[in-house]
Amino acid sequence: MQMQAHVNVDDSATRAGPEVMSPEPGGGARLARVRKLLLSPDLALPLLVLLLFVATALLEPSFLRISNLQNILRQMSVLTVLASAAAITIISGGLDLSIGAVAALSGVVAATVMVDHGVLLGVLAGLACGAVVGVVNGGLVARFDVSPFIVTLGMLSVASGTALTVTGGLPVYGLPTSFTNPLGYQKILGVPISFVLAFITLLLVAALLAYTRFGKYLYALGGNRTATTYAGVPVRRYITAAYVASGTLAGLAGLLLTGRVAAAQPTAGTGLELQAIAAVIIGGIALTGGSGRARHAFYGVALLTLLSNSMNLLSVSSNAQLLVTGLTVIVAVVADRIRRK
Amino acid sequence: MMHTSRPHRLRRAVTFMAGLLMAATAVSACSGSSAGTTDSSPAASGNAAVELNGLLPRLTAEKKYQIGYTLPQFRDPFWVSVAYGIEDEAKKAGLEVVSSNEAGSYADLGKQLSQVDDMTQRGLDAILVAPVDRVGIAPALDNAQRAGIKVIGAGNLASTGAMSAGVTFSHIEAGHRMADAIGKHLNGKGKVVMLNGPNGADWAILRDRGFKEELAANYPGIEIVEQAWLNPDRAAGQTTMEDWLQKRGDSIDAVFSAVSLTAEGAVLALRNAGRAGKVFVATSSLSSAAKDMIAAGEIQFCYAEPGQLVGRLAVQYAIRAIEGKEMAGAKAAEGDEKYPEKVLYVELPPITPETVGKFDPMILDWAPKGFSPA
């Protein structure tokens, strides 16, 4: 392929003179455009997901059963919300490593409140907990201009330590069934409720990023913070707001997780932040910020969840599963670099 | 205009949420303390024969010896209950616990090494250790031994003669027992799936080995159709079991789950598939949710891991080591290990739907609510 491209370019150069004179783009440019289109996250990823889908269905017929598809959607819901959270901070040029631990902390706080004071107060407490952590994260990053990597890494530890202290290391059980049943197994028109909630959240985040001033400023911030500052945008406020949104969404993810497993485990979120960030990057949102859409995060989530489900169905060993997931992330990042060149 | 109004709204929203959180924390703090006071303390009602399960007579120390301990991590309820056993037994047997430590994670051998070194410097009479790494901890323990300090294993053991004795469970035996329970229930024929512990942890590997050994030896008609190595986590157990149920449906007859958290997740998946109670679930270490599931007949077998008892017996062994008395009940170390030379393997009758009503975890197993080590 590479050789072919070179020959084409040489040919067109000798026949039609300098490239600038030619009204038609050269073969190399056309090829580059094809390559770009093929690597574009809006085509390549849905195709990849589809390919995985068809391949698994051929290898393992039980994959296509309605109950398994419902299963996959249910398994996607927590990661969908967490990936939306990760997308917001990454697009703004930041990073929030605390989302997994915050999800666990919010779950624990929500469960503890819920057991004694009802579902509504519990849910509010869980969301508020996430938001408050977001305020602290955002405030520190924006005000003192410190690396979000370090701040949120510290917060990961703080949140996880708090969750363990509050619970004494024990999971919180005995949640009301009016909370655990809908999130655990109930469905609307055959679609698991937890996924419906997660998908609505994703749509809201997509709209927030694409159509609001908040969204536009986040892209501007991620693209070039200095220029955005000179343009008169109150940069610190918007950075803080990005982390508040991320924290609140992490809180929501914690609620979904708690409802699904009918218990709040203080260690539940371990590693989830990395999965969410991996999903975002696989989906084609640049880690450097300023680009990508919420739907891209969703492609990544779909690919990772589908991959895990099909490897379980095909009896791939746990060690090999880790390997495959890791390779997927690496390939995705390399593809992203090639596309942006 | 927009610029001035938006941040204001934002700030108001933030203030509101902060207020909510404070209210929530206050509420949860109140409920926590009230729950603590209603809990009865097992220490007050316990007597030596019950608390030590008749395995050893309770010795009272001749002098007020000073001891210290280091355990892997207090985020794990099991180690909290071992810590409680140590502290409460020390109180009752007339010893003083002067140093309580956790390594903080299984990955932090360095921290545990320095904790042992510090306790050696302080010249304690005995150190109780549950190493995060049974080989890596050896140099620090050898130093302690050279300083004349007795080293006793509590829950996990070390591969060095410096650890003269230890108290733990046999993980191989746990695997055997779960295999026996499944084999008998299925009359030697059927399909079983395995939810193992984390790959690399020696207890997870030994349980896996014990389970497979026993099936191969006595129940060749039982086939292991799926296996996954998972962190002890409800969601992991649930997701994996859901996928297996999709693939194999009603053909799964039994589940081996190395610890109860993954078993709880598996039971949730079985419930959603309408199979809970029909599939035989065997696991180990009793959590409060697992206890309820056993009572409901959704988990049929649980190998007991009484943390509190292990802590108490380790203190009793420490007294015997210091005073040069005989270690009753000790055997050689299991597996291919040479050390410690004297190990007390604790085994309680399994917890099943028939026996769960009679088993009081507060006496031998769990730490009382509100106890926090150190």
Image (cartoon, coloured by chain):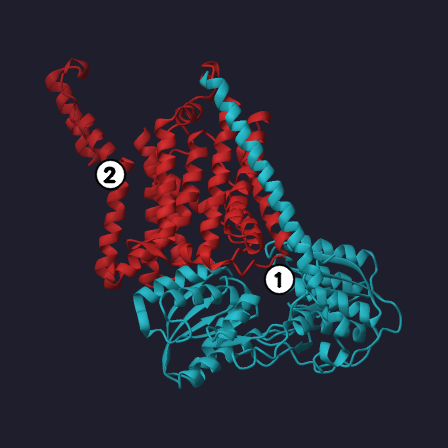
Write down the quadrant of residue B96 in the picture.
bottom right
Could you tell me the amino acid type at mark 1?
Answer: Pro
- The amino acid marked with disc number 2 is Leu
Looking at the rendered image, the quarter that the C terminus of chain B falls into is bottom right
Q: Tell me the SS state at disc 1.
A: helix
Q: Is residue A295 left or right of residue B95?
A: left
How far is mark 2 from mark 1, CA to CA?
A: 48 Å
The crowding category of the residue bearing disc 1, from other C-alpha atoms within 10 Å (few below 14, some 14 to 19, many at least 20), is: some
Outermost residue on the left side: it is A15
Tell me which chain the residue with mark 1 is part of.
B
- The answer to which of B366 and A39 lies nearer the viewer is B366
* Residue B92 falls in image quadrant: bottom right
Q: Is residue A76 visible?
A: no
Image coordinates of residue A44 in percent, x first then y, are 26, 40
Q: Which of A91 and B37 lies nearest the eye of the viewer?
A: B37
Question: Residue A10 location in percent, x, y?
Answer: 16, 24
> In the rendered picture, chain B carries what hue?
cyan
Q: From where the camera sits, is residue B107 visible?
A: yes
| Classed neighbour count for the residue bearing mark 2: other residues with Cα under 10 Å, few (<14), some (14–19), many (≥20) | few
User: Badge 2 is on which residue?
Assistant: A43
Q: Residue reaching furthest right?
A: B63
Q: Are marks 2 and 1 on the same chain?
A: no
Residue A77 coordinates in the image, percent (x, y)? 39, 49
What residue do we see at 44% from left, 50% from top?
Answer: A256
Give the chain coloured red.
Answer: A
Residue A85 in picture, x, y percent from top left: 44, 39
For residue A69, which numbered disc appears in the image? none
Q: Residue sitting at 55 percent across and 37 percent down?
A: B17
Q: B76 or B297: nearer the eye?
A: B297
Q: Which residue is mark 1?
A: B77
- Assign a secondary structure to mark 2: helix
